[in-house]
Image: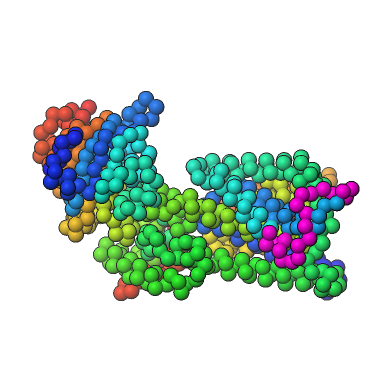
Amino acid sequence: MSLAWSFYISTVLVYLGVDVMACWGLNLQYGYTGILNFSFIIYQSAGAYVAAVLTLGPNTAGSFQQYIGGANLPFPLPIIAGGIAGGLLSAVAGVIALRRLRSDYQAMVFLVISLIATAVVTSDVGLFNGPAGLSLIPQPLSTALNLSLVGYRWFYVGLTAVICLIIYAFLRLITSAPLGRSLRAVRDHEQGAAALGKNVTGLRMTSFVIGGVIAGISGAVLVEFISAWSPGGWLYQETFVLFTALIVGGTANNAGAALGALLVPVAFLEGSRFLPQFGPPGLIDALQWVAVGLMALIFVWFWPRGLLPERRRIIKLPGLPQAGTGQP
Amino acid sequence: MTSVQGQRTTPAAQAALLRVDDLAKSYGGVHAVAGVSFDVLRGRITGLIGPNGAGKSTALGMVAGAIKPSRGSVLLNGTNVAGWPSHKIARRGLARTFQQSSDFAGMTVTENLLTARYGQRGDTLRGALLGRRYWRAEQESLTARAADVIARFDMARMANEFAGNLSGGQRRLLEIMRALMTEPEILLLDEPMAGVNPALGERIEDYLLQLKQDGLTMLMVEHEMAVVERLCDPIIVMAQGEILAEGTMEQIRSDQRVLDAYLN
């Protein structure tokens, strides 16, 4: 494999890992709990910004970029802090949207929160350097490991895979426990769940904050790899790419979410980069958004349960024959 | 037997598991329920009937915590639960079914039943993160109970079927089964026979009678008068947000106000 291909493939694999994490976080919120979180990208972004400023070191006067809360924390603290930032921000947004509103209104509030967050970070240059964003973020352990450029990238692929495995194990503990059933009950019938003694708001908040933590970690992992982050990378449309990935892959199924991450943000959006240029500049980028939207519509219409649908959980009942094979 | 308004005698009051007093709900100037009072006696099926728009489901919703009352009290085992959220009232032993089926469509029948029990060890974040060993034994015992309920309601064939694939009548049964998994003290039924074919309706009726014989207290809103007559005693009649009459079906049939309300 040539050096260029090795560089490219390792980059795509890190992107895949980050998108898989993000889809799992969104899957917990939407697939398992039914929360239409149209602001998902801002929790990923919060994690990215916090990890960036905690790696960059204190901001010095006259620097080409301005930011708050600079520190020089060792790995893996910036990534952990990124997760905490995503969780805290989602807790605030959850308190606003999840306590009293119906799910369709919740979706509207989340969309508005996403737009406000982008506007604030873009306008207030003192926060995270405004529209130019943060750059030259040091990569974790790069000095200590002393690897070649490509060698370090493959190390980061391994690191991303390990974080993915930890998140997967964590999610599996939740979704295979009675807590996972309660989340799905809230998704399927909120009032029915409440009538069984389930604290619907508490369950939603739990799922929403955990999803926010995972989003924050995914953003931190990404920013430590690409060394830069700006508002152009986390516009509200990015959330719809992740929703499309879930719709295509299959909701309430972590394998389906991972497949969706592979097919939509990675294979489809990366693959279209290899198309020959045609039309005016920016046309292909615009067509990508159109194609993502069409993909979501086509799947919702023809395969609403996605390529890997939520699986039927067979439970053996003592003294009774097993039966039932259909799909809802 | 209890009287309609404010004259509940001591023996009846002592036997009341649920006491509703001056319960009202207004939407702007519209009085959906205009201060109703009634008792639900232990071990009986109390029927709540009335023409469409009488306020029956609103009253039931207020008792169950789904609708916040404008005024009044709901004493459940002596505790005033009026205005409490549904989940807190459910934890006090009140289970309910809905007018529109409330099954968890993306879960199997067995999963629907296993979800029902409140306070499971693995139902908190901490419990879930402690792993299967922490909650497995309790799940096995719950699964055994679910198997009993499924067998009792003759639903073994559908145990691992998605609830979303069941017929309307089977969904009604599932709601009742799910409520029973909570081992309630009182069960509120909102039109359990609505949309159910006659054969399954008879089965549901039989099951409800069995539950009554087992001592379960029920409050049932229903339009099928023959079913109400066979199952319920006493029967409370509501119209335009108020209670018109209370008694046996025979007493109610002879009440002119009830006849007028239905004929109008």
> Which residue in the rendered view is the most extreme toward the top?
B29
Residue A30 magenta-highlighted = no
Q: What's the image's color scheme?
A: rainbow
Q: Quadrant of residue A319?
A: bottom left
Residue A63 magenta-highlighted = yes
Residue placed most toward the observer, A100 or B106: A100
Residue B105 x %, y %: 42, 55
- Residue ID at (28%, 67%): B148
- Residue ID at (20%, 47%): B16
Q: Is residue B62 visible?
A: yes
- Residue ID at (82%, 69%): A142
Residue A101 x %, y %: 50, 42
Q: Quadrant of residue A123?
A: top right
Q: Main secondary structure of the magenta part?
A: loop
State the count of labels: 0
Residue placed most toward the observer, B144 or B19: B19
Q: Is residue B169 visible?
A: no
Residue B61 x %, y %: 34, 42
Quadrant occupied by the N terminus of chain A: bottom right
Image position of B92 with respect to B8: above or below: below
Quadrant occupied by the C terminus of chain A: bottom left
- Residue ID at (50%, 64%): B126
Q: What's drawn in magenta, residue-wise?
A: A61-81
Residue placed most toward the observer, B150 or A230: A230
> Which residue in the rendered view is the most extreme toward the right?
A62
Residue B249 x %, y %: 13, 41
Residue placed most toward the observer, A31 or A163: A163
Q: Is residue A102 left or right of residue A272?
A: left
